Image (tube, helix red, strand yellow):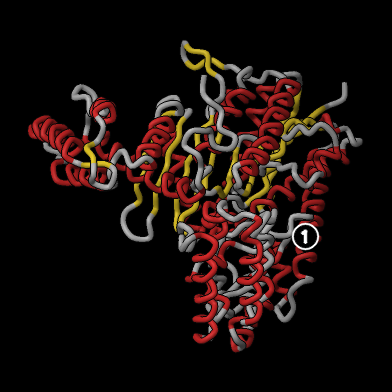
Amino acid sequence: MEEKHLVVFHIGPVQDFIAAARRSQDLWFGSWLLSELAKAAALEIVKQNGNDISCLVFPAPDDLEQLRSFDFSVPNKVMALVKCDPSELGNAVKEALLRRLGKICNDAYRKVSGFNRAVAEQQVKDFPEFFWASYSFNDDYKKARDFAEALLSARKVTRNFAPVTWGSTAPKCSLDGSRESVIPEDAYKVKESELREKYGLQRGERLCGVCLLKRHGRRGPQEYFFSTSHVAALPLLEGLTEEHRPLVGKYIAKLKELGIPADALETVWPQHPVFGPHDGHLLFEERLREFFPEEEKLMEAKKALRTFLEKAFDGKKPLPYYALFLGDGDHMGKVIDAQATPQDHRELSRVQSSFAQEAREIVKEHQGTLIFSGGDDVLALVPLHTVLTCAKKLAKTFRQRLANFKVKDGKEEISPTFSLGIVVAHHLAPLSDVLELARTAEKASKSIKNKNALAVALSKRSGVVRTVKGTWGTLDRRLDWFVKLHRTEAIPDGAAYELRDVVNHLETSDDELKETLLKAAREEAKRILRRKKARRGTERIAEDTLRELEALLKESELSFEKLKQLADELIIAREFAAAMDLADVPLSTPMPGEVSEK
């Protein structure tokens, strides 16, 4: 009988590498790069096993064409059942990975000159983490997988300490802080516009070879990626129609006349039907300073923008906030452990890959832009007026696709669900910070018992981060209701902040006082709601609305934490409502992709 081995490969680094991002381009390309390296590993595994694609357990593409396709994403772990020698396979896979990395690097670096290319290429060659482990397979798949995973975990914590081959006294990279910059210091003596055009840099920014690759790399036919400013501007851009096309042309022509860099204009894919290939960052006065360092030209550009906003949108301005969300399947470890054979695991992998493809379309349908979708992970930028329905549809689709994979959880039988963290952030906030907030929000959703949950964090430029969490079917419906209350002016904005003040003044850790103060907080909350006036202070809050709000203040279930969450939900819902109003989303009809729950 021919001996087989279950081999597990890990390609990294993941968290730190992806988080080292100042622009959405950095984040987008870094995520894609890791997927491409994992795909290169999978393709080499198939090649070394007689082009038998069935040797792949995770991922499990239908054919080689799908594995090579631009839209097919692969997580950073690859698992296969192979007939060849694992040691020889490991060496061949590493060489294939480095070849793919070298080609991607060459494609990116062709667009840049005047940097230390030799050091940059060495930094890129040194950055990947590549670990693998194998275990003999003798018809006991669970045993082989458990041992292979345990060996891989042990290998990953046994770090390599090879000597640094590119160390120097050059300044450290601004993004990751671990590698030296490959941009010569003399390059920073030119005008900022020239620095931007030649290297894609801001004045104080230094980039190592890896981050320079992220900044200038391209993902096949998809040349451009939405900036955070563009995503924030999308609700406003919903108001553009064909009759506004001359106004767009006139505004863009004025910016060209003032000498705006070409890369600041044509940076969006897919294009807006009226605004064209132009990035929404052109709709924010604070972004124009990046393109017009001369004060006189900056003032002219701002004047042109104000004229455009006045004529096209009656003076309305884009909201400065967008959403970044991070979602992940629940109970997937238990589900994978329950797969008794390689065939069972392959079928699970196929369903995960199918969901990843659907996630791409769902995000696109909601005007978002996908950063990564592979297996059961989704990371995307989505505008505020569609993010709630986008997240809801993703969660529902995941549940439906994996409903047949059931496992025992104590006495209950469960199937995978999908938990998701959304962060609402300012378009100029450091992207690495926003990504960390999204991870924190995702962890908050995962902290809900039995999961199947949502967490939303609001990060204003000043003030604390407000986070609310709850299960799907509860929190999302309550947020939808609060959004409609705000949009119809059925509740005043100030009510939420006054409820928050009640908590701030009365919350205590003293057990003897807690119950008394909590009752006082409840009565004060009810008094605030009955005293506040809706419709901009012209009407009392409707009685049926008051009853439903007071039902959320049930004495037997109330806590300071729940009262705090109620206030924060109202505050967060106000941001979504403002975006929906700006996008003129109808109140009476579902939003794009919205599916009513049965």
Identify which residue is drawn at 59% across, 79% down. 170
Report the front residue among 40 and 29.
29
Most extreme residue toward the top is 411
Q: Position of residue 135 (x, y in %)?
A: 72, 31
What is the quadrant of residue 100 in the picture? bottom right
Place of residue 94 in the rendered image (x, y in percent of width and height, measured from the top left): 77, 50
- Residue 521 percent location from the top left of the image: 14, 36
Query: Which quadrant of the figure contains the N terminus?
Result: top right
**Left or right side of 116 for 279:** left
Q: Residue furthest front?
A: 243
| 530, above or below 576, in the image | above
Residue 551 falls in which quadrant of the image?
Answer: top left
Query: Is residue 29 in view from this perspective?
Result: no
Q: Residue at x 42, y 34 (%)?
A: 480
In the rendered view, tell whether residue 258 sits above or below residue 472.
Answer: below
Count numbered badges in the picture. Answer: 1
Element class at badge 1:
helix
* Residue sticking out furthest to the right: 50
Amino acid type assigned to the residue bearing label 1 in the image = Ile
Residue at the image point whose x is 47% and y is 45% from the top: 580
Label 1 neighbour load within 10 Å: few <14, some 14-19, many 20+: some
Q: Is residue 460 visible?
A: yes
Q: Name the residue under label 1.
A: 104
Residue 392 at what x, y percent from top left?
52, 33
Q: Quadrant of residue 328?
A: top right
